[in-house]
Amino acid sequence: MSVKVRIEPVNDRMCIVTRERGQPDSLLRFVAGPDGQVVADLRLNLPGRGCWVTAEREKVELAVKRNLFGRALKTKVSVAPDLGDAVEGLLCAGLLGMMNMARKSGQFITGSGKVEEAVRSGAAIALMHATDAAEDGIRKLRQANTAQAKGDRQAEIPVFRLFSAEELSAAMGEGAFIHAAALAGQAGEGVVKRAIGLARYRYGPDKGAD
């Protein structure tokens, strides 16, 4: 008599809130620091026992509310009540930093005219707008996105609206933008990956992009 054994993927992890399994890119890892404070390990390189939470703000706040971190980490821990805000701050900083890196690498361009050209030519892999961008500019780039997709018979590129113009100016200075596009390449793809992560964290799994 043969017995079938189910083998889970090596990198499979379980969310301490939902008890559902997933890959690391859909979860956030948390560890207890030397002082017992629970911190997010976004780079997956902090030492010690870790636990995983679905990468959504709602799930992180539920883990805090239900005191799940101490149980999962099997030690006495201190959890800041605003852990959800702290995680979002780290995700925002990671995205803004990657935008700056991609801009220096020529893989993140700004300005309505340059962005429209990149979209129509198929060079852009994602669009970004300030949350308070004028509707006329957004509509013009939306039309370019739709036209490019029809021409190449493929899906439209994702569109993100994650920061206001004021937030971008404070964080990026002269690199701030109203409209921008990420281009293919390691840094540009890093921007898209982090934008998807931040949007999912804020709005849930079905709101990764417009």
Image (cartoon, helix red, strand yellow):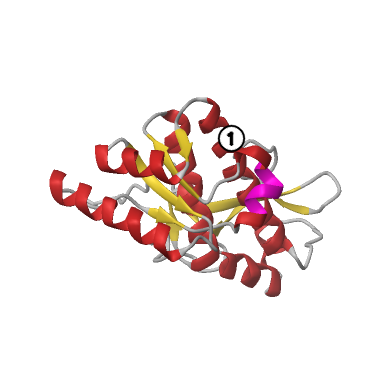
The percent coordinates of residue 162 (x first, y second) are 54, 58
Q: Quadrant of the C terminus?
A: bottom left
Q: Residue 52: where, in percent of width, then height?
A: 57, 55
Q: Nearer the viewer, residue 149 or 43?
A: 149
Q: Is residue 115 above or below residue 198?
A: above
Residue 50: tell me if it is visible: no
Residue 79 falls in image quadrant? bottom right
Judged by its main secondary structure, the magenta piece is: helix
Residue at image coords 15%, 51%: 150
Residues drawn in magenta: 167-172
Residue type at numbered disc 1? Asn
Residue pictured at 32% horizontal, 39% vertical: 117
Name the side, left or right, on which 30 lies relative to 3: right
**Left or right: 49 in relation to 77:** left
Q: Residue at x 69, y 37 (%)?
A: 47
Q: Is residue 71 magenta?
A: no
Q: Is residue 100 visible?
A: yes
Q: Residue furthest top?
A: 105
Task: Give the mark count.
Answer: 1
Q: Secondary structure at mark 1?
A: helix
- Judging depth in this view, the residue of 87 and 105 nearest the camera is 105
